[in-house]
Image (tube, rainbow, N blue to C red):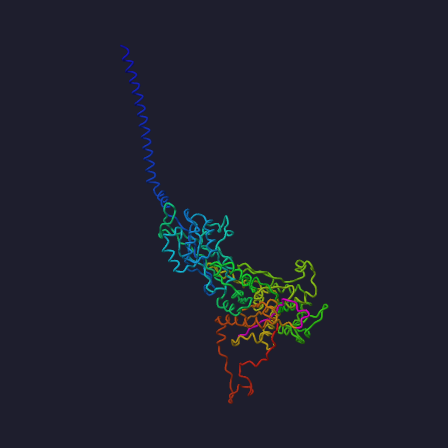
Amino acid sequence: MSEPSIFFTEVNERQGVFHRRAFLMGGLSGLGLLALTGRLAHLQLLEAQRYEKMSASNQFNFRLVPPPRGLIVDRNGVILASNRPNFRLLVAKDGKMDPEGTVKTLAHFVPLDAERQARLTKDLIRAPKRSPVSVMEDMSWEQFSAINVRAPELPGVTADMGEVRVYPHGGAFAHVIGYVAKVNKEDIQPTGPNSEAIMLHPGFRIGRQGVEKAFDLRLRGRPGAQKVEVDANGREVRQDSGGDIAATPGAEIQLSLDADIQTRALEVMGDESGAVVMLDCRTGDVLCMASAPSFDANRFVRGMTGSEYRALANYERKPLLDKAMSGLYPPGSTFKPTVALAALEAGIDPEIRVNCSGGWYYGGRTWRCWKHGGHGSQNMHDAIKNSCDIYFYQTALKVGPDPIARAAHALGFGQVFDLGIPGQKKGIVGSREWKRKAVKREPVWQPGDSVSYGIGQGYVNVNALQLAVMTARLANGRKALNPRLVRSIGGKELPSGAAVPDLPFQQEHVDYVRGAMIAVANDVTGTAYRQSQLGLGDVMMAGKTGTAQVRSYDNVADRNSASVQWKLKDHNLFVAFAPYDAPRYALSVIVEHGGLGGATAGAPRAREVMRVALLKDPEIRARIEKPLPMPELTPDGLAEGAAPDAPTAGAPPPAPRPPEGRT
């Protein structure tokens, strides 16, 4: 009777275990379903926006768009560098693309020679996946249309419209403004602005010279982005313009240059090699800084072939060299006003006379004047007016190099000015200390060094900018003006060049030198009388001629270089300011190998450039156009007090023609 009770006990135990296990499994399943429901609720309710954005990011990409580069304008708002639309052809490498075959196919629609095809094939092979490679810029509308029509047959090929830098004035401002060009490997840096992804964009350009290089970061702006829809392979399907991010244009830079004056300067230089620099005598603003011959900066933007670049680089007149800032020349007789000012400050009596017979024997050799037969008895005023070498040989010997060097530095020689752009060369201003450090073979200053120094030869080298600064400081008479090239950046004005100390010279000494420069251009016996007449009423110009030797004339009977090859001719220089009674503008002109006599090549070009500046000035123009007062006439029709054959009132007397070739 006991066995059945044992059996039911075991059954009950097994049922209890089953129920406990079922309950445990049900609980676990319930917890799982609850967790799954909670997770689904979290994803659908709380994380919906996040995953929607992630989904869209897989469907859409943003393609970087280069920003419009900032404009560069002149003092009057005339555009010197801008941007224009540009049809371009791009190829983005795909995994299935045949680079060589693609390039050959494109050659049927756009001009690609064999050399260019080979280079493009290499670029495509080396380029990262889907990174566009520029095939051609400035396509015509016909070429652009032909590529777009066949776009479905050309995977990875895109013909679109971007922007390209353009310089409306061609070569007139090439050395000052510079140019932009494609980014190369050396430009890309691991950190900083040059590490940004936009640097890899085929349409992005970087400044290479002048203002474009010096202010590149301010001109760049900030890139934008174009929203595009892509397929599963990452290829673009269509554009979604609603999601585009606009680019921020670069800052506008306004220069102090005047487009009319600069263009005229390059015109009057013609085929000659040299420079023209003009400054405002009141503010120091650089109105003109032209270097000739020049080059078309637009050619560098599009890309220049090797043969084109070699032709520019090897031309003997060096169009790639900025002669206004980087070209160094002996100043010749344009240095004589500096020597005269140093002599006056050193206590030399300007009325002491020196006899010029055409030659002066000193130190075992004869030092010759440019004028055969000499100038006769000369005081300082006459010596500047006639550019007498003998007078300045002896005067420099009396004064010595150090006072001359101090005066030269005070007038701007031997300096690099803060124009904001690179490329200036300091030049040489000789002194005893300078020679001790620089000339190891003969560190002691010799008396003969002073003799050459007195006429702007020997240990002195300057550039056209320094000559213009010297002239502007003398014309101003009081302020040690500094040149200013950049007027404003992004609308913010930069400090004026007139916010400077006074010149360290006595006023009467500056006035004396200026008076002699007035005589150079307005006395009928001055070395630049004929070539300096502006023809603008009573507005007159003052100046100083100069000739700088490039070869020795020892034992040479005649310095006339008309028959020698170009590179052996003397440099021709001229500095001037106007109006001489109330100076507004100062300029320097250097004509490389222009021949003997600063009046023959430099002065006529200075006159033409000066006329443009004066006629553009409203105050000067009003003065020019003001009618002269009518003379009172006697009953017989003659001006009162005039002889019957006297010239008409206001007309200058006939002037004797001065000899040619004066220095």
Name the image quarter holding residue 160: bottom left
Give the residue displayed 50% in from the left and 82% down from the top. 630
Is the residue 599 above or below the residue 225 in the image? below
Q: Is residue 553 magenta?
A: yes
Chief SS of the magenta region: loop
Q: Is residue 66 magenta?
A: no
Q: Viewed as shown, does residue 564 lie left or right of 56?
A: right
- The x and y percentages for residue 328 are 59, 63
- Quadrant location of the N terminus? top left
Is the residue 151 above or below the residue 25 in the image? below
Q: Nearer the viewer, residue 201 or 245?
A: 201
Which range is magenta?
539-557
- Quadrant location of the C terminus? bottom right
Q: How many marks?
A: 0
> Among all residues in the image, which is located at the extreme right?
364
Residue 506 visible within the image? no
- The x and y percentages for residue 408 are 62, 64
- The x and y percentages for residue 184 are 50, 53
> Among all residues in the image, which is located at the extreme top?
1
Q: Nearer the viewer, residue 476 or 205?
A: 205
Q: Viewed as shown, does residue 566 lie left or right of 46?
A: right
Q: Nearer the viewer, residue 340 or 368?
A: 368
Give the residue displayed 32% in from the left and 24% down from the top. 21
- The x and y percentages for residue 124 are 45, 50
Name the image quarter holding residue 562: bottom right
> Among all residues in the image, which is located at the extreme bottom?
636
Residue 263 visible within the image? yes
Is the residue 630 above or below the residue 483 in the image? below
